[in-house]
Image: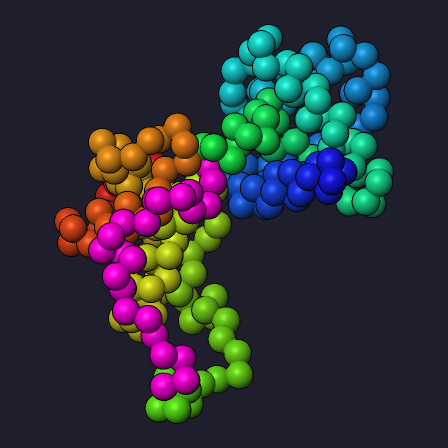
Amino acid sequence: MKRNMTLAAVALLVAALALVAMVQAIFYFTAEDLESDEDLWELYGRWAAHHEVVREPGRFPTFKANAHMLHSEQRDVGELMALNVFGDKSFDEVMATTSCLKRTGELLPELEQLPVIDLDLVAATRALPSKVDWRYANAVTDVKNCCWAFATAAAVEGLHAIKTKSAAVSLSPQFLLDCTYPYIDQSSGGSRYKALALIKKVGGISSESVYPY
């Protein structure tokens, strides 16, 4: 069980890595970087400079553990892994601050009352294609980053493009971060549901060009 949980944690960290890869290049390292604490501290410094973050002595044990874990799992599963911007964060910290996972009681009453779509009725009244790739319909913008605000903005981008049959326009996650701040616990991953409710309440969301991240 512990082994499976470790692999699951690695998989989620790698998934987060894939989301930020378009924004910032990943940081590879070798076994030689792990030979001593001095080597690891130097690696931590290079990693911090690469990702433009501050190297914190108190976070070194977490960075060290993550580097060793990635190196060990890489050997076991035959995958190429690297340290992303979350390199000195624990798995729980990453999930708490970037996760879009629904927590108990998070759904708003108005969202719980949304009508259920009868898929059988839809299939009976509309000829559906065998497959759809919305990227080729210009309904998907570039991957930007990973957190509830980016996920919400991306969802609205796609829905608007599909509804209006126009090219997707990058929307502002910073607008959501700033405007939902009074209503959510920012340290616990935010809330896609409350962000969507805010967009509905105010009648829209700013574009990224007008309200940059």
Q: Which residue: 42% across, 71% down? A: 137
Asked if residue 94 shows in the view, the reply is: yes
The residue stretch that appears in magenta: 98-121
Q: Please state the horizontal and vertical placement of residue 163, each as a whole percent of the image.
A: 29, 71
Q: Which residue: 83% across, 26% down? A: 31
Is residue 8 toward the left or the right of residue 20 in the image? right
Q: Which residue: 84% across, 38% down? A: 75
Is residue 197 toward the left or the right of residue 30 in the image? left
Q: Quadrant of residue 44?
A: top right
Majority SS type along the magenta span? loop
Give the quarter of the figure containing the N terminus.
top right
Q: Is residue 190 above or below residue 68?
A: below
Give whichever of 48, 12 is nearer the camera. 12
Q: Please state the horizontal and vertical placement of residue 175, each as a whole percent of the image.
A: 26, 40
Q: Please state the horizontal and vertical placement of residue 210, each as a whole percent of the image.
A: 24, 43
Q: Is residue 183 above or below residue 88?
A: below
Give whichever of 2, 97 is nearer the camera. 2
- Kindly give the residue lying farthest to the left in the view shown: 202
Give the quarter of the figure containing the C terminus.
top left
Is residue 79 located in the magenta-colored stretch of the structure? Answer: no
Q: Which residue: 53% across, 78% down? A: 131
